[in-house]
């Protein structure tokens, strides 16, 4: 994070015209892949991410099965064409780490103990990356879990806050992430009030950190509303389909 | 490719219908499922396309970089086709190194593009023997409901047509990027048509359940002039020479139809 | 396929002096490796290929076993010294694809249903490659299967046709393959009259394709005679050996 | 990270004690185990250190080589952090490619060093865009008894402070090694402090049995000026925002204490 | 081995001041890692090596289990920082070979038949390499086996002899190994009088070889005394600990 | 190396015969099986040989390319020995990365050639520090009936003697290939002799069944002047120093005999 580029203009606006505490445009859709047990799609700014859930199902290889709960697995993966410079398809160290932290962000929300000896597999595919993909990936994966009918204690929703040109901002884009002073991705369970993913790079005083954490949580709460709408839209669509069937 | 279990009864039903010239989903033997093509969906890629063929969904991204030419083709750009069967797309797909099916798919698409000389690779050389454009075609299967080859070939072609490459100038042996972009130079438009052999009939564009029970698969790729540029037989069965020749004539017609979906004018 | 080199001379002959519809010299031998259950060797032009069959035998890893038939596996592999420039021993994408199409060429000929829960493993090693190795590999693998005593519906025999300097030719060598206009490898079951491997690169009209397909099938029929002779030679050799034993 | 079985009774005992503000090994909730640091133990490495934190033992070696800079940082040296969980250290560790735990560890240590700008990387460039110093930090876990992150961060920092790099001179574009060595130029000293959440309390420096039963893990890394330079939450549980803020204040104090063990003056 | 550097000075002494038949300083310690069932540490010259033993324990993967004896496995591995130029963490061909020969050096000493269906896993980590690491690794691994309480026919102890500047020498350091004329690592079971590891690079006449082999065995016998002392020191330490406990 | 099951009765028979100085196949304890050597069998390789030792069959191909020297040997060509145990050769061999047996074999052969300085590597430098000949020896086991080391060493030596390398000229720092070829410059001819220890006797050239029951294996490689250039003990047993010395004397004689099969005049 070098901070050489000017990221906040004279009107206090960001490179993409947003106010410091403003989210990027977000679009979500639930239930879009026919093979998966659950699936969802998110666009947040220019980031475009798909998630699918398979399970609860038999565990392969079998010796990984847990006697008292489901095995939750998560794979965060980027398409070779999702970034400026083509990415090799083999998982990078970054992708392996993010798979782990996203899994751990979702795990506290899922009633794993209801499905012993099975696996629940979450696949997140980043089709285009423009910053904040671990957060958007967490948000969309939670939708896919819900779409798969997996019983959950709460939804999980994620959003980053950070610091650019000395200003605390919400939902960093790629440029702000790379050139800013700090990035703080947070996953939140809005009804339980718990933080299930927390990372930080950069430099923040404890005071700044407190504010940034609150800002991120506020962002999560806003995105949570959109999550619920996306789920509702799916059920309305199903209802309409059923009614059309019954009428015909 | 897949071992999704479908019941014996349903298997019988599908093959008996085909024997009598019909298909379970109402299509005729040589009908494609509804096809939907979108391009330019990945702004960070130099070219991209999404193809829906029934419920089969494929995204292709084209990335363009600079690199070295092959020693035996010093004056030509380099083409690389890669495919990934990500586990999101099917319970049968696993993470890890590419499966033989995935490699076969990429190689069949590659041959169609390469042998029809679709891309004018000789226009993609900046400094002979040293610097050329490298074109990466990455095929990403998002939902597998059969006939990945045709969907991938169509998406690849649509993505190539959609591709804009940055213009470079060479000054005193130094390469400089300009702010301009130009379309990828193309001279041909290959289309792959795939048949499944079921009940001794060839049906076009098999969906997943048909692939489960097919005895053999035959893909014939045609260039814009109606010439064959690639063939691939797959599956554990065999075909008569007559079946193959018949398939070629049908495929040539179908290829014309499909090409019109991506090539305007 | 660039077509810059002259591949057909003024007398209509090819770079190695053959007529368009002439095969290269072919030599086959059956039963040459003592460890394998069946084995064979072929020289076709300068291509030199060994095949071995192990099985029917227990499947490793076991979970791959099929309840109703044998698992047929095939590995086509090139020795590092088999080509002009040393090849890395790790299987290339080309080798993986050819392993698949050769397996699928042999599969329809084998009574796999007679050996449920077993595997039949075919190993093809190209010691020297001079064009047409997938075809010669298929031909020699069929001999090794027969030598292993695996019951078969038919032999499988393979041969390529193609187009060089505008002329349709049989059994392309390496130079013709690389510099010609089209290559059409075909595997054929001569008694059943069925095509079990079919690939093509290059450009052919449907008319040319029909002719080339017929040419390749005619080539297959010629090679089939040599296959049968090679099998017979093996049995004669065995018979002689047995008789010598009985006499001594 | 580990599934060493500890009895239910012992689990209960550990968590009940923590609920009442005590720990089975007699420590207070925010006490570290005894820490022992040795440096310069690997003479063939440019820098090295061994840290014992209770029975957890980590060795870090720093190797310095010449190499190319990253294209987007042509004037800076390159830092690489790698960790190996060798099977000698725990019955849970296996030979083979690095586990996700091992990768996470290395990346957390890396972020602490990188974000605090601990190493003056801009002083490690010899020929801009061409030749720079490459610093390899290799973390080698020798005995795993919990809290590998703090032990590894401490050992990495001690090894960096211990590092002497060869001095090179550039003459007419040629790089020549001199016989001299200089300390690795450093401007900051990050310290990682890790908590385990057990019985809704945060305990510092968990040992292996505590890690077995913890619900979540939280690591906060502080630079020398008391600023946070890296955070990592781990484990399958979650934390309240209040817990996190409280942890930050405690960690800042603890980081000061630990830093004094490695940074003299 | 080029022999360009002078390795024996005018007084017949070696580059590190040793006499030809003199060992480097050796320090051993037993039982230093708390997780392993047995462990030991050795410093021989500047070589620094740790060994740990886990087992007898359940075999993973299970199909490797042997019905009539324990499976002995050994992994010799070098830390990336153990050598002049940083070594990649992936096992090199050299490390794979040394793992095999060290395993085979230890195998004849262990009563494997007492623990059917289990594995005994030996892990050797070279923290610093200065020549002779396969020998020191064998010596320290034998200590770790003893520390793990694995019943043994004999200890195993290893030492190299070699030829530098035409002189037969004991216990080569890195420079002597690289620049000398021959290196002969030997592992020996001192009570059984058997050689269980033997390798050689370089050039030796049979006469020289005989002398070098004897020299190496003499070296082994000296190191064996140190091995026994290290084991005794461990037991004394334990005894003292126990007594302290009883007194308090 | 192998776990082909042979019956206990046959095992006993083999070892009892050896105890009384005989072998099941009629050989004396220090007799080789019939050896057949062919060279030049792979025209596309710069050198090649096939060795039959009884039913053990090994093909070696030598490829010669240009490449960079090792930094510490700037004036020498590079030698690389690789071996593949392809699954065609034995039910015990598996496809995949080389097994430890395969790596050991290649390294033992490599040491024999390298330590005897068989190839005049210093004559294989074209531009010091930049361009040298790289010699690849690829050992390909086609049928495994025991004693792969001796058969591979013999085939490697025969293939090296058979090798013709292209002649290059260096003009103004540019390397040009001429149409000429020259023999690979060689100064030594190492021969490996392998013993199996069975019933406390050392038998030469063990076949597969003998390897199954041997207690230890000992390979001694001799150069043309009767000096030892490589030794490798294998197997899970041990040997007395006396056995080893005796083996050396026998091996020296045998090496002379075998060398005459490949080195003429």
Image (cartoon, coloured by chain):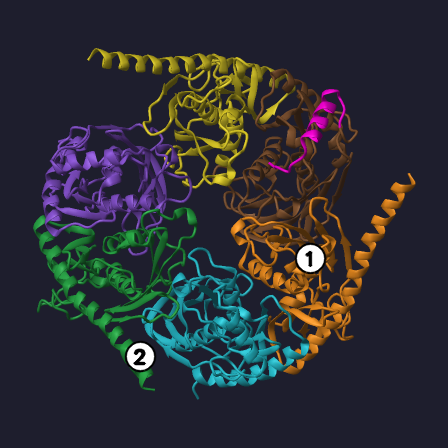
Chain colours: A orange, B brown, C yellow, D cyan, E green, F purple
Q: Going 24% across and 70% down the picture, which residue do you hit?
A: E231
Q: Going 29% across and 28% down the picture, which residue do you hit?
A: F40
* Residue placed under numbered mark 2 in the picture: E242
Q: Is residue F44 magenta?
A: no
Q: Residue F68 carries which label?
A: none
Q: Position of residue D264 (x, y in %)?
A: 43, 86
**Pointers 2 and 1 within a single chain:** no
> Are there few (<14), some (14-19), or many (20+) residues within 10 Å of tag 1?
many
From the viewer's side, name the closer residue of C34 and F190. C34
Residue B82 picture quarter: top right
Q: Does the magenta stretch include residue B10?
A: yes
Viewer can see residue B27? yes
Q: Going 29% across and 61% down the picture, which residue do you hit?
A: E150
Q: Give the range drawn in magenta.
A: B1-23
Q: Position of residue B53 (x, y in %)?
A: 73, 37
Q: Residue A141 carries which label?
A: 1
Viewer can see residue E164? no
Q: Where is residue F195 in the image (x, y as percent from the top left)?
A: 18, 41
Q: What element carries label 2?
A: helix
In the rendered structure, the answer to whether residue C125 lies left or right of residue F23 reads right
Relative to E203, does residue B17 appear above or below in the rendering? above
The chain under label 1 reads A
The chain under label 2 reads E
Give the Cα distance between marks 2 and 1: 56 Å
From the viewer's side, name the closer residue of E58 and D227. E58
- Name the mark nearer the viewer: 2 or 1: 2
Residue C146 picture quarter: top left
Q: Is mark 1 on a helix, strand or loop?
A: helix
Relative to D180, does residue B217 appear above or below in the rendering? above
Residue furthest bottom in the image: D265
Q: Where is residue A151 in the image (x, y as percent from the top left)?
A: 71, 58
> Are there few (<14), some (14-19), or many (20+) residues within 10 Å of tag 2?
few
């Amino acid at each position: 994070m070098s901070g050489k580029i000017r990221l906040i203009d004279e009107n206090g606006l960001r490179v993409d015209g947003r106010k410091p505490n403003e989210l990027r445009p977000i679009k979500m859709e639930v239930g879009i892949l026919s093979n998966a047990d659950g699936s969802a799609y998110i666009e947040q700014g220019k980031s475009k991410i798909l998630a699918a859930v398979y399970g609860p199902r038999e565990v392969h290889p079998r010796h990984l099965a847990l006697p008292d709960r489901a095995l939750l697995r998560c794979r965060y993966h980027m398409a070779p064409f999702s970034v400026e410079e083509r990415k090799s398809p083999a998982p990078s160290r970054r992708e392996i780490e993010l798979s782990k932290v996203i899994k751990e962000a979702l795990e506290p929300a899922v009633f794993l103990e209801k499905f012993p000896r099975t696996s629940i597999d979450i696949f997140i595919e980043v089709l285009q990356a423009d910053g904040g993909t671990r957060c958007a990936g967490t948000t969309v994966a939670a939708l896919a879990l819900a779409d798969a009918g997996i019983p959950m204690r709460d939804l999980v929703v994620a959003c980053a806050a950070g610091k650019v040109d000395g200003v605390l901002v919400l939902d960093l884009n790629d440029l702000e992430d790379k050139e800013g002073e700090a990035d703080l991705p947070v996953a939140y369970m809005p009804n339980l009030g718990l933080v299930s993913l927390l990372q930080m790079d950069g430099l923040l005083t404890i005071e700044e950190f407190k504010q940034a954490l609150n800002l991120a949580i506020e962002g999560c709460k806003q995105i949570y509303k959109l999550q619920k709408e996306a789920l509702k839209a799916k059920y309305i669509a199903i209802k309409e389909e059923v009614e059309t069937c019954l009428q015909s | 490719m897949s071992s999704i279990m479908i019941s014996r009864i349903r298997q019988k039903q599908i093959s008996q219908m085909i024997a009598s010239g019909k298909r379970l989903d109402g299509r005729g033997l040589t009908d494609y499922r509804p096809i939907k093509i979108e391009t330019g969906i990945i702004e960070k890629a130099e070219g991209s396309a999404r193809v829906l063929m029934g419920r089969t969904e494929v995204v292709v991204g084209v990335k363009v970089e600079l690199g070295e030419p092959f020693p035996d083709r010093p004056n030509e750009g380099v083409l690389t086709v890669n495919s990934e069967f990500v586990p999101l797309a099917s319970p049968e797909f696993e993470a890890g190194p590419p499966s033989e099916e995935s490699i076969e798919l990429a190689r069949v698409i590659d041959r169609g593009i390469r042998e029809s000389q679709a891309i004018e690779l000789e226009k993609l050389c900046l400094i002979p023997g040293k610097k050329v454009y490298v074109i990466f075609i990455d095929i990403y299967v998002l939902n597998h409901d059969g006939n990945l080859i045709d969907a991938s070939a169509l998406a690849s072609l649509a993505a190539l047509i959609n591709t804009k490459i940055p213009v470079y100038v060479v000054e005193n042996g130094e390469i400089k990027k300009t702010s301009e972009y130009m379309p990828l130079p193309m001279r041909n438009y290959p289309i792959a048509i795939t048949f499944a052999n079921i009940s001794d009939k060839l049906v076009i564009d098999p969906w997943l359940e048909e692939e489960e029970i097919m005895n053999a698969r035959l893909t014939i790729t045609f260039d814009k002039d109606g010439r064959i540029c690639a063939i691939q037989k797959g599956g554990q069965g065999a075909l008569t020479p007559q079946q193959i020749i018949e398939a070629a004539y049908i495929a040539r017609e179908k290829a014309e139809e499909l090409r019109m979906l991506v090539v305007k004018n």
